[in-house]
Amino acid sequence: MDIPESHPRYRSLLLRERVAWGVEAGITGQIGLIAHGRGEAFDYLLGERTTPSAWRAEAVGVAALMLADHPVISVNGNTAALVANDIIALGDALGAGIEVNIFYRSEERRERIIRYLEERGATELYVGSDARIPGLAHNRGIVDSQGIYAADAVLVPLEDGDRCSALKGMGKTVVTIDLNPLSRTARTADVAIVDNIVRAVPNMRSLVEELGSVTGPELQRMLEYYDNGRALTDALDEITAHLQESF
């Protein structure tokens, strides 16, 4: 689709086209279109911006991943279609490996996402299927024993709530990116970033550099002082304020 830059929904339409391309390329599942539309609705409510509470959560999420001994980034079809290059750059900056994990799993689609990431320069990829997250009967429970299964901190953008809960049950620190502050995922995660993934991931990449000179104890204090429930309340307040300003 040829979208003129003058269109008031130019960027939003580009993202829709990107997800639709992902479906055509066999990277994104068709249900991913529904998930993207739901997130887009919440982004409207936020004012399509990184709010102050989201920026704070991004900084704390980066701190958690920097403190981890074995951080891993989980990637699904929507994430690959929307921010493949940025997620690879973030993983490189953090020293975090990437593992493809998809709900509507087929080996063909999983391999396509892996190849797509490799073509864009991803080298630290966990591609095994030799372990299972306890308590998860569906396919997202199948993981690499050296990747998500062994990780002490996991970034799980665009996540489903039951896997987030299961990862927490394994004692892992879970950082998620979720535009819906009311979702089970957002409420379950240690750090929920209420922001569009196309803004959040580049922001986090920049924050890795900004926090590079911060000591371990200082990063730890960032985590200790962070209250995820309070942050979600702040996100809801920001939505309310934006709506009041708009009408």
Image (cartoon, grey):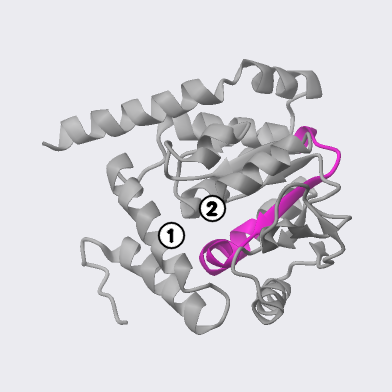
Residue at 62% x, 16% y is: 225
**Figure check: 147 above or below 224:** below
Q: Which residue is mark 2?
A: 158
Residue at 11% x, 36% y is: 247
Task: Residue 140: name its quadrant.
Answer: bottom right
Residue at 72% x, 42% y is: 167
| Residue 177: x %, y % from top left | 54, 45
The reply to whether the magenta stretch includes residue 77 is yes
Q: Is residue 206 visible?
A: no
Residue at 63% x, 64% y is: 102
**Amino acid under label 2?**
Leu
Could you say whether the residue bearing mark 1 is in a helix, strand or loop?
A: helix
Q: Which residue is mark 1?
A: 35
- Between 141 and 16, the one lying in front of the other is 141
**Amino acid under label 1?**
Ala
| Residue 77: x %, y % from top left | 57, 67
Task: Residue 228: name its quadrant.
Answer: top right
**Figure check: 152 above or below 36:** above
Start-end of magenta stretch: 66-87
**Figure check: 52 above or below 80:** above
| Residue 9: x %, y % from top left | 25, 62
Between the residue at mark 2 and the residue at mark 1, the CA separation in whole angstroms equals 9 Å
Q: Is residue 91 visible?
A: yes
Determine whether label 2 and label 1 are within 8 Å by CB.
yes
